[in-house]
Amino acid sequence: MDLGTVGAVSAIGAACCAIGAGLIAGGRVAWRILANTVRTRDAILGTPASGDEPARPGIVGRLSVVEQRLASLESQSRQIKAEVTPNGGGSLKDAVGRIDRRTQAVDELLGAHIRQHNGGAVDPTVRLIHPDRQRG
């Protein structure tokens, strides 16, 4: 083989290597794009169970679960709001108001009773002790 032939074969070999390297690099890019496309499709549509992997619902399935949970939270929120909003006697807020008014009435009666026995003076530092308990 003469020198010209060797150069031509070398050039063809180098061109083939360059084309092969380009195809490999392009193949890697194409593979990444394809893999991302498949993952995106699986996320949208979901995947069935296979082997040890459980089924994964798609976006529609996930949104339906979110909607069910939201409906449940809205129902609970309405129930809580009904309990903390006065409604003429049946709510928790009405019950707390009744207890507060009754406690104030008892407080006023007790204060009047103490003033009657103390000659009108009320000592806020006095603590009532049950007779069976000793001071300690």
Image (cartoon, rainbow, N blue to C red):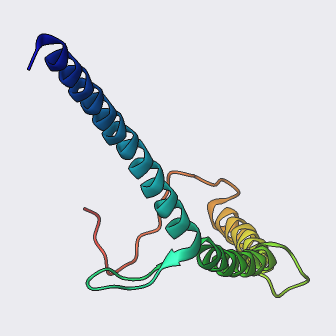
Which quadrant does the N terminus fall into? top left
> Measuring 53% from the left and 60% from the top, which residue is drawn there?
40
* Residue 122 can be seen, yes or no: yes
Question: Compared to 89, does 85 lie above or below?
Answer: above
Say left or right for 133 vs 72: left
Q: Nearer the viewer, residue 120 or 49?
A: 49
- Determine the residue located farthest toward the top in the rendered image: 3
**Lateral position of residue 112 relative to residue 11, left or right:** right
> Does residue 57 appear in this view?
no
Front-lying residue, 118 or 83: 83
**Which residue is pictured at 67% across the width and 81% down the height?**
68
Location of residue 97 (image quadrant):
bottom right
Q: Is 15 or 3 nearer to us in this picture?
A: 3
- Asked if 15 appears above or below 43 in the picture, the reply is above
* 39 vs 125: above or below: below
Residue 111 percent across, percent down from the top left: 69, 65
- Residue beneath the point at 27% across and 33% down: 16
Q: Farthest right residue?
A: 88
114 versus 56 height, above or below: above
Please tell me which residue is depicted at 69% across the width and 76% down the height of the picture.
67
Residue 80: image quadrant is bottom right
Residue 59 % position (x, y): 61, 71
| Quadrant that contains the C terminus | bottom left
Q: Nearer the viewer, residue 56 or 97?
A: 56
In the rendered image, residue 83, in percent from the top left (x then y), is placed at 76, 79
> For the view shown, which residue lies furthest in the front direction?
2
Q: How many marks?
A: 0
Residue 129 on image: x %, y %:
41, 70
| Residue 13 found in image quarter | top left
